[in-house]
Amino acid sequence: MNHYCKSPRYLISFNSKKLGVFKTPVLIIGSGIAGLRAALEAARSGPVILITKSNINESNTFYAQGGIAGHINNPALVNSHIKDTIQAGQGLSNPATVKFLIPKSIPLIKELIRWGLHFDGKGNHPGRLRLDLAHEGGHSHPRILHAGGDNTGLNIVNTLVAKVRNTPQIKIMEYQIALDLLTIKISGSHETFCVGALVYDNTSGEIKVLQSKKTILATGGLGQIYRETTNPELATGDGIALAYRAGAVLQDLEFIQFHPTAFYVAGASRTLISETVRGAGGLLRDNNGFRFMPDYHPRAELAPRDVVARSIINQMKLTNDTSIYLDLTHLDTVYIRKRFPGLDRLCKNFDIDITKDFIPVRPSAHYLIGGIKINRRCETNLKNLYAAGEVAASGFHGANRLGSNSLLEGLVLGQLAGASAGKIISKKGFPELNIHSSFKSDQSLSRLGITGPIRQIDIIDVKNSLRSLMWREVGLNRTAAGLQEALKKINFWCGYIMDKKFTEPSGWELQNMLTVAGLVTTAALKRTESRGVHYRSDFPETDNKNFQRKFSC
């Protein structure tokens, strides 16, 4: 994919020979479900270093409420799960990948139970489970496992983190920011080899080299490039940006899933309200109390997520309101409070009683469907670089992710990436590194005609402007004019920011956000059709002739 504006190969000037070097057979970047599971698998073969941008518990997985899709006690329904996933992907899911990943998830989910994860229901032995299964949009059967009501992600993370902390082969390094992947050319080969990462220690301010024989990217998504998002603050697309700078192939970045129902109150973070709430009987109403979803789709509130999200936006415009309302008041009060304790606590903070009051909601950017292109072994086009989880494009989701398939994919891809990396670790020593980068900076303002003293860039202001632009022009409804305007502004910001040498994380984050925003916008401009979560009002029809992917088995 061609970029829209020049980006330096490395974000900072450095010489690897003058930095501290830490060596490990396997380096894992990210501590969500994919990164944690990858670490546990790779550790079977040798030492692992796992680094994370914040503390080890902080990730998109931690905030996942809905659950994980899986028929662990009824294998006969696996085929319907495969069918639903392919149908949701609208012609872009790789059927072979879907048929491969879904059955592999069953023993891995049972493994989580053996490691101490308690799914809601009766019994907690893989052979004697009677589990509560929730129903979500796009699913033909109830198949969503949840743990602790709407705290599934939190409980999965706690289970995996405990296992990781008790695995001596895994060294955890928190508050480490991966600035760039390190790559080299080896004599006699035309391929580019990944040999680790350049890392900033956010506690000491030290920049160092983590040299590895195998590197696994599990850095999650990019929701923070949008003004409205359910993602935590760390989800700034760093993994996509540093993979792009290293030369990794990217795919399907135009497919950003917008969750239909995020809690929307002034001053509150855009907390996701699980689709499972609608699966339990929650209804969507406008400010007149009208239940509108049956007018948009036969499945009403359980229509695919992209349909529900666009329907909400349209109904907001029709009623001139800033939100829509989730109604649980007709449901059993004891059941609702027990089933959704996190939602109950959240709403109480704003004097909303979920058994008596409507809950204000609106769509928010939620999940990156595309990412770094990988094969079934989680390998990228760069030798010794793997990717897993939300940062990866495996061909599983296609153009629209089926609800609760993300934790499933992260779990399976994490295990596959860890197994692949650990299985083929070379017994040879580490090559000597002689990587250095130097570039001139702060010259671009004059090229843009901006003269006079160069003041410090207001990073927060540029970030907020970018996020508003992306929400407005590269959100749920896209047009050529809006996308071109977005690219024009991103290009302008890139012109004086991309070659500036920042010395702290917020500046590097801004550079990554600009890089990723430009890539997403460019991809959306090239896809002149509507499919799944990518909707172009100037090209509202699906164009199978030019855009449906062909797969060979």
Image (tube, helix red, strand yellow):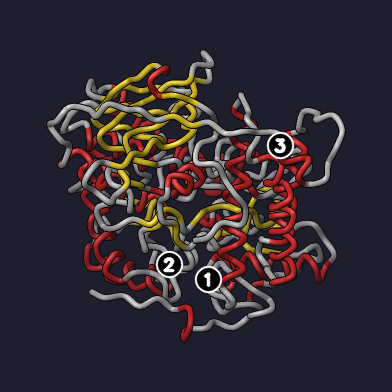
Instruction: Decide which of tag 2 and tag 1 comes sooner along the chain.
Output: 2
Kindly state the secondary structure of the residue where label 1 is placed: loop
| Percent position of residue 46, x then y | 18, 29
**On the image, numbered disc 2 is attached to which residue?**
398
| Residue type indicated by callout 3 | Gln
Q: Are marks 2 and 1 in contact (CB under 8 Å)?
A: yes
| Percent position of residue 305, x then y | 55, 65
Spatial separation of the CA atoms under disc 2 and disc 1: 8 Å
Vertical placement of residue 534 versus 280, above or below: below
**On the image, numbered disc 1 is attached to which residue?**
532
Kindly state the secondary structure of the residue where label 3 is placed: loop
Of residue 494 and residue 287, the one placed in the foreground of this image is 494
Residue under the point 50% across and 41% down: 9
**On the image, numbered disc 3 is attached to which residue?**
443
Kindly state the secondary structure of the residue where label 2 is placed: loop
Describe residue 111's horizontal placement relative to residue 134 as left or right. Answer: left
Instruction: Decide which of tag 3 and tag 1 comes sooner along the chain.
Output: 3
